């Protein structure tokens, strides 16, 4: 089988749990995510917990670490991607009813406890 990648990037902003990061790698491999960008203090696959939870998928899905989530968003936009924050915000559509652009999307995932900051949400093209 030929592996195909969707024009989809996942940007993780300071996720607290190495196990959550590992599960993002597993899910991303299943759906053909092009790249995962780990930002701030998000654990990377060099962390034993992340590597264990990823079950080897960190070797199949392209990833990189970026100190600044704002820089990661700027890079995604420079690549022509629409940046979509996954956050509960009053008045925003639910993900299942949002018409995701076909030209490529960068999904921003926030911290498990604090979510995505209002300043970062303002940098995104949409919120679902």
Image (cartoon, rainbow, N blue to C red):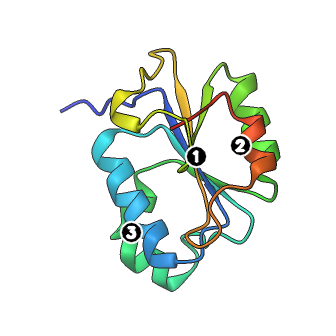
In primary-sequence order, the first of circles 3 and 2 is 3
Q: Position of residue 52 (x, y in %)?
A: 39, 79
Residue holding disc 2: 121
In this rendered view, identify the residue nearer to me: 125 or 24.
Answer: 125
Q: Position of residue 15 (x, y in %)?
A: 60, 68
In this rendered view, identify the residue nearer to me: 5 or 118.
Answer: 118
Identify the residue at horizontal 42%, vertical 40% (top origin). Answer: 33
Identify the residue at horizontal 40%, vertical 37% (top origin). Answer: 95
Which of label 3 and label 1 is nearer to you?
1
Q: Position of residue 89 (x, y in %)?
A: 58, 46
Q: How much space separates mark 1 and mark 2, taking CA atoms?
A: 10 Å
Image marks 3 and 1: residues in contact by CB distance under 8 Å: no
Residue holding disc 3: 54
Which of label 3 and label 2 is nearer to you?
2
Asked whether, in this view, residue 102 is left or right of residue 125, the answer is left
Q: Is residue 62 above or below residue 104?
A: below
Q: For residue 72, which quarter of the picture?
A: top right
Asked whether, in this view, residue 85 is left or right of residue 54, the answer is right
Q: How much space separates mark 3 and mark 1, taking CA atoms?
A: 29 Å
In primary-sequence order, the first of circles 1 and 2 is 1
Identify the residue at horizontal 42%, vertical 59% (top origin). Answer: 24
Q: Which mark is residue 89?
A: 1
In primary-sequence order, the first of circles 3 and 1 is 3
What secondary structure is found at the residue carrying circle 2? helix
Q: For residue 111, which quarter of the picture?
A: bottom right
Q: How many marks?
A: 3
What secondary structure is found at the residue carrying circle 3? helix
Identify the residue at horizontal 75%, vertical 65% (top origin). Answer: 40
Q: Quadrant of the N terminus?
A: top left
Asked whether, in this view, residue 76 is left or right of residue 61, the answer is right
Q: Residues within 10 Å of mark 2 (few under 14, many from 20)?
A: some
């Amino acid at each position: 089988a030929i592996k195909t990648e969707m024009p989809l990037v996942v940007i993780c902003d300071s996720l607290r749990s190495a196990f959550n990061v590992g599960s993002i790698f597993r899910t991303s491999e299943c759906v053909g995510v092009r790249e995962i960008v780990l930002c701030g203090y998000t654990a990377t696959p060099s962390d034993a917990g992340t590597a264990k939870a990823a079950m080897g998928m960190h070797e199949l899905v392209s990833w990189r670490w970026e100190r600044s989530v704002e820089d990661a968003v700027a890079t995604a936009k420079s690549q022509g991607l629409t940046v979509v924050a996954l956050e509960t915000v009053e008045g925003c559509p639910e993900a299942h009813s949002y018409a995701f652009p076909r030209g490529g999307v960068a999904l921003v995932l926030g911290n498990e406890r604090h979510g995505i900051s209002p300043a970062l949400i303002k940098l995104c093209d949409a919120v679902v």
